[in-house]
Amino acid sequence: MASSMAATASLSPPVLSAERPTARGGLFFPPSPASSRSLRLQSARRSGISPATRKPRSLPRAAKVVVAVKADPLKVMIAGAPASGKGTQCELIKSKYGLVHISAGDLLRAEIAAGSENGKRAKEFMEKGQLVPDEIVVNMVKERLLQPDAQEKGWLLDGYPRSYSQAMALETLGIRPDIFILLDVPDELLVERVVGRRLDPVTGRIYHLKYSPPENEEIASRLTQRFDDTEEKVKLRLQTHYQNVESLLSIYEDVIVEVKGDALVDDVFAEIDKQLTSSLDKKTEMVASA
Ligand code: AP5
């Protein structure tokens, strides 16, 4: 969404410079030497003078050229222990940056709700706090990532990859994030967050009975709890998380940003927002200087 920037330049004269990039469909494309040369020649032929002797056409001093520069959409991965706040932050990121939110856990719960074979198998592993096997998860996420909306708007991958093999499945397709956000929350807070979590089946919003209570009675009465949100299961999920997270860090070393997740929701988001803006600025600068 926020992936465009207006670059304004005062030019005298502002015409047909061979070096100046041209904007096509919002993107910068440097003109090829051949096309710039032929443009100058055609123009010279029409005026009857040679390009070398022709004076630049004078334009008002205040003339400005505004060029839209559009970078590739952002590609973001967010990871962290169970209940570290991934889903909560994804709601905020999505609404500010317009990225397509792809949550591996949500995709699996949709399979369970649909009663599919994959859903039935996945539930056995989720009940035990273990990772669902790659043959179910990998293709499911890959297919969703490659859909046109995610390619056009950018994506926000939540809870995937969670293991070395899952990350490598993306690497072999050349799919890499611009930024990998790792939420860091002390273990002792996670159990309380899990057992108090509630979900609104109508809006999909995430609540917490203490930290983020429902706004009114009507919402409170329809809230549901996840089948794996018990103290016993979160401990198993936490174990699984620690067994796997290290293996990801080496793959995404160059784009990892660790964010403290034990502050207020808005403060955590402020830090993430700062990091995403900086990542987006870097992408835009790269396009502008290409
Ligand atoms: P998944 O659904 O992804 O669960 P998870 O990783 O355990 O993470 P959670 O959804 O529990 O927490 P969250 O970090 O999103 O926190 P939230 O924002 O909701 O996966 C479930 C299962 O599916 C896995 O165990 C596994 O079996 C399987 N699976 C998923 N992905 C897989 C993969 N790639 N491969 C194989 N298997 C896979 O916040 C939690 C609570 O805290 C909420 O109540 C919220 O209101 C509150 N809260 C959030 N932030 C704050 C804050 N700053 N202060 C106070 N409270 C807060």
Image (spheres, rainbow, N blue to C red):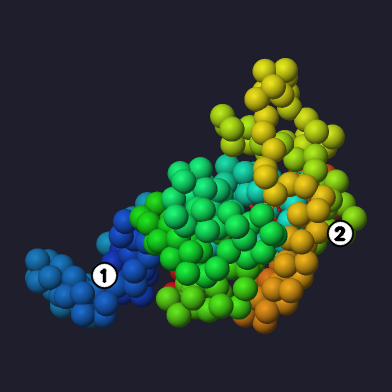
Sequence-earlier tag: 2 or 1: 1
- Identified by mark 2, the residue type is Asp
Q: Which mark is residue 187?
A: 2
The quarter of the picture where the C terminus appears is: bottom left
Q: Residue at x 63, y 32 (%)?
A: 200
Between 48 and 273, the residue placed more toward the observer is 273
Between 18 and 195, the residue placed more toward the observer is 195
Q: Is residue 288 visible?
A: no
**Whole-percent x, y for residue 133 in the image:** 55, 68
Image-quadrant location for residue 223: top right
- Real-space CA distance between mark 2 and mark 1, rounded to the nearest whole angstrom: 72 Å
> Can you say whether 42 is above or below 148 in the image?
below
Q: Which mark is residue 55?
A: 1
Between 290 and 91, the residue placed more toward the observer is 91
Front of the two marks 2 and 1: 2
> Can you say whether 107 is above or below 180 in the image?
above
Between 98 and 242, the residue placed more toward the observer is 242
Q: Is mark 2 within 8 Å of ligand 1?
A: no
**Whole-percent x, y for residue 257 in the image:** 71, 67
Q: Residue at x 51, y 43 (%)?
A: 113
Numbered disc 2: secondary structure: helix
Judged from this view, the residue extending furthest toward the top is: 217
